[in-house]
Image (spheres, rainbow, N blue to C red):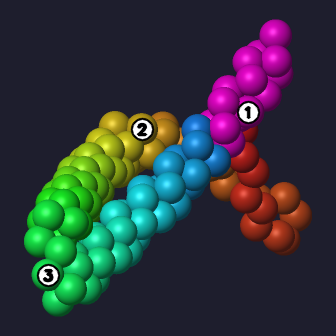
């Protein structure tokens, strides 16, 4: 029964890592997309303003501002996520990894003239 739990937990861990990687890439693409859309709307607004199409230009600048705020919001979210990652990493090292190492998970023993490392 322990083997089943081990493989189930290992599968869940791999799934969580994969999901994390997907979300990180998606956040980068989203931020980049918002920045590109902001530039596109700004350029469109400048062109419309030069043609004296003030209403269309105003709309374009409004859209550019919306995308600018969205890009800033995603950067803030990324910074918060990074802070949480650092906190989690510290927690993991302090409360999960360090106690496991100090609990003698590694047993050194001498067999003949060679020194072996065995994991329990």
Q: Is residue 52 left or right of residue 111?
A: left
Q: Residues within 10 Å of mark 2 (few under 14, many from 20)?
A: few
Task: Find residue 59 and report its image quarter.
Answer: bottom left
| Residue 11 visible here | yes
64 in relation to 92, above or below: below
The quadrant holding residue 113 is: bottom right
Frontmost residue, 31 versus 107 = 31
Residue under numbered circle 1: 11
Q: Report the quarter where the N terminus lies.
A: top right
Residue at screen point 77% across, 61% down: 116
| Mark 2 or mark 1: whose residue is earlier in sequence | 1
Which mark's residue is nearer the viewer, 1 or 3? Answer: 3
Image quadrant holding the C terminus, namely top right
Residue named by callout 2:
96
* Structural distance between the alpha carbons of marks 2 and 1: 19 Å
Badge 2 vs badge 3, beta-carbon distance below 8 Å: no
Instruction: Return the disc, 2 or 3, that comes first in the chain's sequence.
Output: 3
SS at circle 2: helix
């Amino acid at each position: 029964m322990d083997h089943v739990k081990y493989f189930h937990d290992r599968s869940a861990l791999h799934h969580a890592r994969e999901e994390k990687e997907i979300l990180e890439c998606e956040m980068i693409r989203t931020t980049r997309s918002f920045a590109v859309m902001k530039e596109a709307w700004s350029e469109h607004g400048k062109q419309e303003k030069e043609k004296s199409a003030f209403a269309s230009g105003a709309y374009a600048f409004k859209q550019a501002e919306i995308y600018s705020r969205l890009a800033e919001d995603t950067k803030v979210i990324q910074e918060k996520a990074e802070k949480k990652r650092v906190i989690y990493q510290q927690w993991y090292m302090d409360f999960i990894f360090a106690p496991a190492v100090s609990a003698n998970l590694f047993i050194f023993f001498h067999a003949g003239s060679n020194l072996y490392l065995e994991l329990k």
